[in-house]
Amino acid sequence: MGFLLCGIVPAMNTVIEWFGLAASVIVAISLMMKNLVRLRLVNLVGSAAFALYGLLIHAWPVFLLNTFIVLVNGFYLWTMKQDSQRPETFELLELSPKDPYVEHFVDFYREDIRKFFPSFTGIPTDDPEVRLCFILRQTVPVSLVVYKKNASGEVTILLDYAVPAYRDLKNARFFFEQALRRIAEGASVVHATAEVPVHGAYLRKIGFAPVDSDEATQRYTKKL
């Protein structure tokens, strides 16, 4: 019996150590997430696992600290849920492409913008047909849309970018289903181009249909 226990105890210790390591990895992964809800949720799972690890090895400071982190994450997830259930206010802020804030915004997010628009080099400032607006969500600028409207009533989207924390499609639905009808009065068709698959998937989710493509891009349209 003693020999058997001598074999079981080290094996159990090894399992517990691997469990603690897995908990640490989950916490580390959570810290790399840009979406705050996912960060909190995954961090809660990792902290709960790490608290259990502390309990199993009788490391009470580890157990108490991670239990506290679980409670903090739970509290913030609850407040985020409450906030998400409140009616949100969406507004448009139309600016000139030459506005200093536009330049600052684009410079700040340039690298992230190029993940979705690889050929993006900047907003045209010498084309009088180019229009630009920010989508404000609770007065916070969360999306930038740059577009052109031609004489036949067709709109071409040049840039449609949402900041990482607000990529839940609500901004896009507000713009394409409500705001665009007003600011581009008379427009009947919207054109957009996807250079990367993830942007094409986004366009399909908000009602665009693919029409044609070439080696580098896929073109989409949406009727208003």
Image (cartoon, helix red, strand yellow):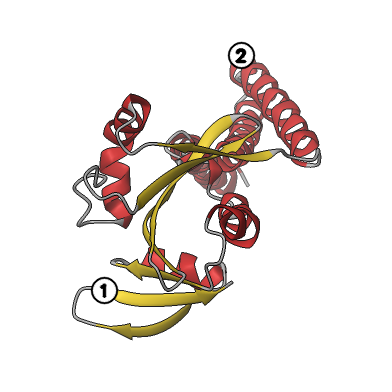
Q: Quadrant of the C terminus?
A: bottom right
Element type where label 2 sits in the image:
helix
Picture quadrant where residue 67 is located = top right
Asked if residue 9 can be seen in this view, the reply is no
The residue carrying mark 2 is 61
Type of amino acid under label 1: Thr
Identify the residue at horizontal 64%, vertical 31% (top origin): 56
Task: Decide: few, some or many residues near mark 1? Use Cα within 10 Å; few <14, some 14-19, many ≥20.
Answer: some
Task: Locate residue 13, reporting x and y percent.
Answer: 52, 38
Find the distance from the CA under tag 1 to the CA under tag 2: 55 Å
Mark toward the viewer: 1 or 2:
1
Task: Locate residue 30, reporting x and y percent.
Answer: 50, 38
Compared across the picture, whether 79 is left or right of 151 comes to: right
Task: Locate residue 174, reporting x and y percent.
Answer: 63, 53
Q: Nearer the viewer, residue 181 or 109?
A: 181
The residue carrying mark 1 is 217
Picture quadrant where residue 137 is located = top right
Task: Locate residue 169, reporting x and y percent.
Answer: 58, 55
Q: Nearer the viewer, residue 221 or 84?
A: 221
Element type where label 1 sits in the image:
loop
Task: Look at the picture and state if 187 lies above or below 63.
Answer: below
